[in-house]
Amino acid sequence: MTAPNPTARRYRPPAPLGGRRRATGSPAGRNARAWAFLAPALIIIGLFVLWPMLSALRLSFMDASGFGREEFIGLENYVTVFTDPDVRDAVVNTLWYTVLFTPTAVVSALALALLLNSPRMPFRSFFRTALFVPFVVSFAVAAFAWSYLIDPQVGLLNYWLRGLGIQLGNVLEDPTLAMPAVVLVAVWKLFGFYFVIFLAGLQDIPTSLYEAARMDGAGPWSRFKNVTLPMLSNTMAFVLIFAMIAALQAFDQIYVMTGGGPYGHTQTLVMEIYESGFRKLDIGFASALSYVLLAATLILSLVQFLFFGRKEKDLSS
Amino acid sequence: MTRKRILAGAVGAALAITATGCSGGGDGGGPVELTFWHGYTEADGDVLQGIVDEFNAAHDDVEITTELKTWASIDDTLLTALSAGEGPDIVAMPAERLPVYADKGAFAELDDFYADAESNTANLNPGAVEMVTVDDTEYGVPTGFVPLAVYYNQALFDAAGVTAFPQTWDEWVAVSQQLTVDEDGDGTPEQYGVVLPDHATVANGLWPSLFYGNGGGIAEGGEAVIDSPENAETLRFWSDAIVGDQISPTGVDGVGADELFSGGKAAMTVGGPWMASIATENSIDYGIAPLPAGPAAQAASAIGVSMAVTVDTSRAEQEAAEEFFSFFLNDENAVAWSLGSGWPPLRTDIPADAVAENPVVASLTEIAGTGQPLLPGVVNTTDVLSAVDELTQQAVAGGDVDALLAEAQTKVQEALDE
């Protein structure tokens, strides 16, 4: 076999710190050692992820309450999932939430990342930190804080808007405004994460590409469209998938702020799962609904992944 | 340390984590140990603790430990705790939640206990017992049963010149209008005559009370009866009063109602005995009155609280819990609990003068007989109550009452048929 790349022959890996040590012991011993190192993670994943998932899968075929009384009912729970009008309403609400949340969060994160990536921007580090802070705050805390801000009686936001002559009213009890309100809280809370990912993606784009584009006479919009966006397509896929998953799993702030109300207008799928499982104690049905949601999330993620994966290939060819 | 030991240690740690999930029973030589979850967070909690302490002192073979939680967190954690084998042995909860758990097999049957003459259950308020009965079997012992009542702010009544408490719905609306004040004339009153929540009302009982008052109902003998001309009339009457006459803010829930009353922004609220202590805390001079009578009847839905024995308890634990229940209901403790908690006595054979020293209890005891249990015999109270909530919230928001009632009828019937 000839060496196709002469540099590869010259390369020698640096010696590990503390001097070189040879792998000792029999292959079986090495195997055991590998397992020992993996064990903590495997045990935690097995105990807290895999085991509950398998239990839930089993329960989804049962008429079960969680108190020990179980009866195998085959696919009945799954049939209910696809025929129940409450589930249908929850699907519509969840899709509406996703449509409101995903573009808003992604576009605002990208816009701010572009703004704060520019070296001319003053106080860049301060703004970068400030934008990330909401992501660190617990969702429940953020939801309580926002509930107070938009409260019609004591809310600061309502007070200011009244000063501008805008009557917002009782937003969380308003069937058309309640959903945008809970989406807004999610955007505020989560977009900092997407922002940081975009920022990292932007910093990975070689400046030479922009220089070349500028030489070719590309304006700011053209540079954004023809350099930034294509180069960000992996990042974009990641952020979009994460944002969509976050939207499909919307629960925390809705539980705190509206409880699914007013009259079911913010009742998302996860709220429905919670209500079936913990209010109506129908754990079997809740498990089946969870699995259907999992499958839907997986399929949507795969579709996005394939879509963006192909784009990436187009660019390289 | 050898590799094998590391591995063994990791597995051992995992086993230890799982093993802690299994708590010990009372099978050893020591006393039977019982955990008791309840949500009595105010002065009532101290009185309950006193009764438990006395019981423990009098019984060498039983030790009850109370765990104080909020009612909401009991409801949120009971399922997971019981399925992990870490749940309480005795648990108190809102009575309308009990059938949901009982039907799913979470609680031990108590019919033998009720049949026992020593159990002190013979003279319990029948409405209270109805709320803990599922398919003719008792699954709980009531710890509270009181009809919703109007708590009013005496100072605001005096300021508006209201001298007599309203006796009928029309008078109620008229007095509420008199008490509603829009000082700056911006169309939003600063003070409301009354606060009538349109969803998640106190013990879910406000709208059922109003329905009963006009001769309507929600469910009877397994049939939905919510879509009735009486209920349509009731919804229209109160929507007109709330939205048209602005006697109450809209879009408020039960908790919001308590806050508006304690903040002096509403002259009347429909609530439970705890409003008395909330009013005192906020220096509000308050009065208590029965709900004004509707065209058909003076009626009020009752707030019920009950306690039950969970299903994983051993025979000995269940007997010990029953021993405690009869102790809780004996002559002395029935009076002590009533006076301390501010709720009327649960036993109808307790004479009124036994609780006369507490004026709140005395006035609630007078109306205790008028309380109607909420959805007796209904198992899936969750869906029925959320159908009622959706109905009232949309009706007050201006929805088509007839269409909403038809929709609620279907949902309630579906829940009853499950």
Image (cartoon, coloured by chain):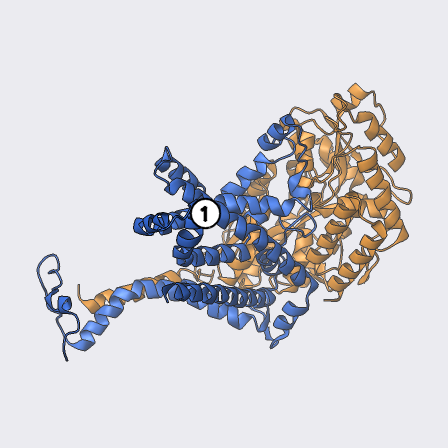
Please say whether residue B82 is visible from this viewpoint.
yes
- Work out whether B131 lies above or below B278: below
In the rendered structure, the colour chosen for chain A is: blue
Which residue is under mark 1?
A: A221
Describe the element under mark 1 as helix, strand or loop: helix
**B18 or B218: nearer the eye?**
B218
Q: Quadrant of residue A32?
A: bottom left
**Residue B193 shown left or right of residue A72 in the figure:** right
Q: Which residue is pictured at 12% across the width and 60% down the height?
A: A14
**B139 or B282: nearer the eye?**
B282
Please say whether residue B136 is visible from this viewpoint.
no
Q: Chain of mark 1?
A: A
- Work out whether B189 lies above or below A9: above
Q: Which residue is pictured at 83% across the width and 29% down the height?
A: B177
Q: Name the amino acid type tagged 1.
A: Trp
In the rendered structure, the colour chosen for chain B is: orange
